[in-house]
Every structure is written in structure tokens, then in C-alpha cells.
Amino acid sequence: MCRFGIMRWQWGKVQSIRRFAKQAVAIDRRGITLLEIIMVMAILIALASWTIPTVQRSFSAQKLIKAADQIRGELNRARVGAMRTGEIHAFFYQEQTANFKVSAFNNEVMQVLSDSFRQQQDRQTA
């Protein structure tokens, strides 16, 4: 009986030590594990890959609206200039660029246009 009592006492001591060790581990664990960091990064990357194209489409739409407003303003300026001077005004632009110009349409402009048209044809045939 004595021997059984000693074993029981030792077993209880081992259990109380284990319980104390578990509590100590639970109290001291205040950091973040590598797995938790990786999971958070994966979630952030997934959200970014989902929202970035939406934001880019929004920016490109705003850019297009701004360009259209700018061209609309220049066309109105050409209209007002034509009404004011009584001359024909024209809207000139270069393809594949953002360059454009509004000016009175006269013989000098006609000469420049015909020269540039000839140069373009020469490049295409060469």
C-alpha cells in the first residue's frame, strides 16, 4: 500500500508539472508563427491581384474621359474662332500620338498638308 501511495503521489506530481508547463507555454506564446505570416501574405496578395485590375480600368477610363473633354474643348475653340473671324478653322492631329492643333484653314496650311501627305506616300511606296 505504501508503494502504491508513493506511485500515486509521483504520478500526481508529474501531472501537476505537465499542467504547469502547459500554462507556462500558453502564457509565453505572444509571437507570430511563420505559418501565420505566410497566410496573411497570401490573403493580401490575393486581394491585391483582385483589386489592382479594377483600379487600373478605372484610371484608364478617367484618362479617356479627360482626353475626350480636351478634344471637345479644342473643337469648341475652333468653332468660336471660325465664327469670330469668318474663316474656316480645322482640327489637325497626328495619328498614334497625343499631338493636335486647331488653326485657320488657309493656303499655307493646305501647302503643309499636301507636303506631309506626299511624304507619307513616299514612305509607304519605298
Image (cartoon, grey):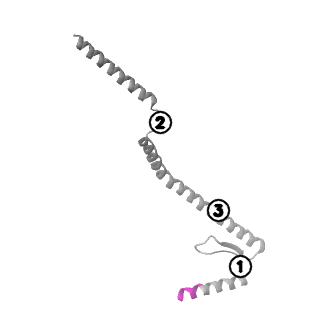
Residue 69's disc number = 3
Residue displayed at 72% across by 67% down: 77
Marked residue nearer the N-terminal end (3 or 2) = 2
Q: Which residue is mark 1?
A: 105
Which residue range is magenta in the image?
120-126
Q: Amino acid at mark 2?
A: Gly
Q: Gap in Å between the C-alphas at discs 1 and 2?
A: 75 Å
Residue at the image position 30 percent from the left and 18 percent from the top: 10
Q: Is residue 37 magenta?
A: no
Q: CA distance from mark 1 to mark 3?
A: 23 Å
Determine which residue is flagged by label 2: 31
Is label 1 in a helix, a strand or a loop? loop
> In the figure, is residue 17 to the left or right of 119?
left
Residue 120: percent from left, percent from top = 59, 84
Q: Is residue 101 left or right of residue 124?
A: right
Q: Which mark is residue 124?
A: none
